[in-house]
Image (cartoon, rainbow, N blue to C red):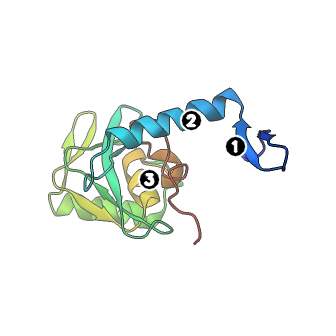
Amino acid sequence: MLSKQVSFIVDNRGNRQAAVVPIDIYDELMALQKALQESRPGERELYHFHVKGAVASGYPVGQRHQPGFMLLAGSTLVAEQADSLREAVIELRLSLQAKGLLVTEAPGYRLTEDYLFNSPSLAASLVAGNNRSGLDAWRNDAGFSLKASGFGKKE
């Protein structure tokens, strides 16, 4: 978006009066405006991740620059896991199964209770069965990723 050309209409003193933006930026702004109008104060914005038949939902928790992620009960996970999957994710999956929080449900797994992860990437990697960037994977109803929604940026 930063590489797009934005032109300004200025008055005779050089003050900006209006902006001319590419249509794709305009469309993103309109979608964001609609999402803001439809949200209610105090309501958490849900983010979703669909991969290989798995469907998961949750919301970011904590600081915007380094959020955790609450994965909601009922989310489904891919059964297969890649050989390259981080050991911490494999151990977490086994731990959740042992505690009964992750149950086998064809074709994969289902989370039985809400679970707080220390990062959106850990949650996305667990859902997908391979390493993922959670800031890119999780998307809201308007189609914006956590990253595009301002999460994960240094203050």
Numbered disc 3: secondary structure: helix
Which residue is located at x 16 percent, y 63 percent?
99
Residue positioned most to the front: 12
Q: Which residue is mark 1?
A: 1
Q: Position of residue 114 (x, y in %)?
A: 20, 56
Of labels 2 and 3, the one closer to you: 2
Query: Looking at the image, which is closer to me, 17 or 52?
Result: 17
CA distance for labels 1 and 2: 10 Å
In the visual, does 112 lie left or right of 59?
Answer: left
The image quarter containing residue 19 is top right
Q: Position of residue 22 (x, y in %)?
A: 71, 31
CA distance for labels 2 and 3: 27 Å
Which residue is located at x 33 percent, y 54 percent?
59
Q: Which residue is mark 3?
A: 125
The image quarter containing residue 20 is top right
In the visual, does 124 lie left or right of 76?
Answer: right
Query: Looking at the image, which is closer to me, 23 or 80?
Result: 23
Q: Which residue is mark 2?
A: 28
**Residue contact at pointers 1 and 3, CB within 8 angstroms:** no
If the image is split into quadrants, where does the C terminus sit? bottom right
CA distance for labels 1 and 3: 27 Å
In the depicted structure, whether residue 7 falls above or below residue 87: above
Which amino acid, mark 3? Ser
In the depicted structure, whether residue 114 falls above or below residue 6: below
Which amino acid, mark 2? Glu
Which amino acid, mark 1? Met
If the image is split into quadrants, where does the N terminus sit? top right
Which residue is located at x 38 percent, y 56 percent?
123
